[in-house]
Image (spheres, coloured by chain):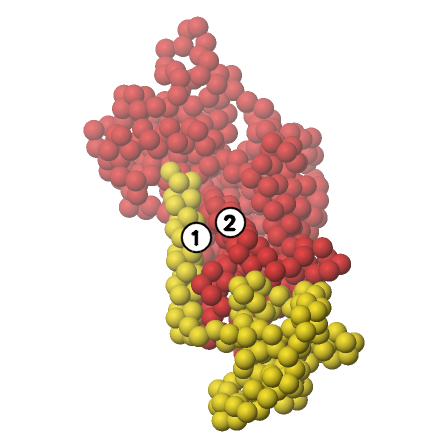
Amino acid sequence: MPLGVLLLGERPRGGGYWWDFALVLGYAGLAMMGVQFALTARFKRATAPFGIDLIYYFHRFLATVAFALLLLHAGLLWWKYPEAVGSIDPRRAPGHMTLGWLAMLAFTTGIVSSLWRKRLRIEYDRWRRLHVLLALLGVVLAVLHVEGSGTYLRSPWKRAAWTALALSWLSLAMWVRLVRPALLLRRPWRVTEVRRERGRSWTLTLAPERGAVFAYQPGQFAWLTLRASPFALREHPFSFASSPTRPGSVQFTIKELGDFTRGIGRIQPGERAYLDGPYGSFGIDRHPGASGFVFIAGGVGIAPLIGMLRAMADRGDRRPLWLFYGNRNWERVVFREELDALAGTLDLTVVHVLGEPPADWRGETGFIDRDVLQRHLPSGRADLHYLVCGPAPMIRLAERSLDELGIPLKQLHSEIFDIA
Amino acid sequence: MREQWARGLALATGLLVLVLSAAFAVIVNRSDRRPVADAVPPPAAVAMVEAHPDATAGAGNGNDPVAQLVARGQAVFAQHDCARCHSVAGKGSPRSPLDGVGSRLSRDELHDWVVASDTVRQDLSPRAIAAKQRYAALPAADMAALLAYLASLRQ
């Protein structure tokens, strides 16, 4: 952490253990907040080895931890040194202290609105705009608060280093929110087809207005903007359901679930779209040495997996494959017919697992648990790679079951739908 | 599983930062146990004062404040939020304690430190100088009371 260097390199006079502890916590907490801009800046290279869902979980937890440190910073000072903190009343307090309190307010609002977004019934797009605004506001106010109080920034070069650090966070935010949307604006896409699928899902086909589709791997995803400017923060992440082996266009299969996806079927061919991608590290191409793959999908979590299956079919891949596919009922099984066809081309075993099976159903029922997996997987199952995609509870169950079946964790790859 | 992993990593980072912060606080306070204050002269000045004990003693004795004046000075001290940067008997910012400042400095020297006059300016941070500017405009009676209060802070 660059922060440690910045802090330990200087020699302010001691002000008592708790005093210095509390002050450093302020710097540390703010620096951790600043790191959030880097975490969410969508650096392809940096996020590639981890997977974007992990990055966003980390963002969420780290920001919460940073917030706790900032609370501790303010709380300790207020509790141990009330006279030094002085009045909260902005008419009496010096400007930099008021800025500090306002930063705290912005961070508090940001954390509360994020952790309890659904409970507070804040619509996703609106929340994202609020989130970006509060994050920027909080960090700018806090940086000014530090510049104003500046206990550890007596020497000019230390102040310069700290200011540079703060500017680097802000420039990251500028990059994500201004520069990249501007780049996207220059590469517009067009919706060429909107097709209804089973289970209240739709497949959107998009083609670039000029030039070729970017290079991507099956299983990756992109941020999709429809009926809005790339600057409007109305983008949503979707996995490619298409395969790069079929060039010229990309496809997304999207289920009517949330605020944005509910209206997905009303999109018309010919509409303009913007795509920021590809991102993500979920997919078969990350594990070229695997002797075979087991796919586990829940509902529309099939989207990235069908892309991989299509790619393997086109490439003439002969490795053994299994697909465990969980759905509520038989009529809602997205890509049901295509999976039958793929099972004929590939060495693919499809195991449908239904929550509410029809009366004459003779296949698996319930959840994709340990027993279901054990019944269909071969004895050499510990050598296979496992790709799991679906809602979080399904992934947790699948991961636990596979762990119990002795599958090494490093062969287990998952991507969670509905991160927010 | 990935969620737990991310949570563990975030918590570990938080703990690491806590430990580093604690270590920082320990190091900073170990390297300088002796409480020093903005209003306390650097070693050279201390040496000078020690070399001329009469001056300090004389100034101190000659201005023995009446309790009323000291009380008013204390009120001026509170009114101008001096505790934001200074502590007295553990109250206020511990960075620059003023305990015993009346034993170490003469009335004139106290005045120099209060208003950041040219003689002490080089020993103050720009921020402290800026903050002290406005005390030069204190009414004479308030200043006298404040100085009396500071002079009463003896060890």
Indicate whether A233 appears above or below A368: below
Q: Which amino acid does label 2 sit on?
A: Ala
Task: Please identify which colour was used for chain A in the image.
Answer: red
The label shown at residue A68 is: 2
Q: In which quarter of the image is residue B67?
A: bottom right
| Disc 2 chain ID | A
Q: Where is residue A279 in the image (x, y as percent from the top left)?
A: 49, 49
Residue B108 shown left or right of residue B52 in the figure: right
Indicate whether A114 appears above or below A157: above
Compare residues A340 and A123 and report the one nearer the observer: A123
Q: Which residue is drawn at 60% across and 84% down?
A: B61
Q: What residue type is labelled 1?
A: Gly
Q: Which chain comes out yellow in the rendered image?
A: B
Local secondary structure at mark 2: helix
Is disc 2 surrounded by few (<14), some (14 to 19) or many (20+) residues within 10 Å? some
| Disc 1 chain ID | B
Give the total number of marks visible in the rendering: 2
The answer to whether marks 2 and 1 mark residues whose Cβ atoms lie closer than 8 Å is: yes
Disc 1: which residue: B14
Q: Could you give the CA–CA distance between mark 2 and mark 1, rounded to whole angstroms?
A: 9 Å
Local secondary structure at mark 1: helix
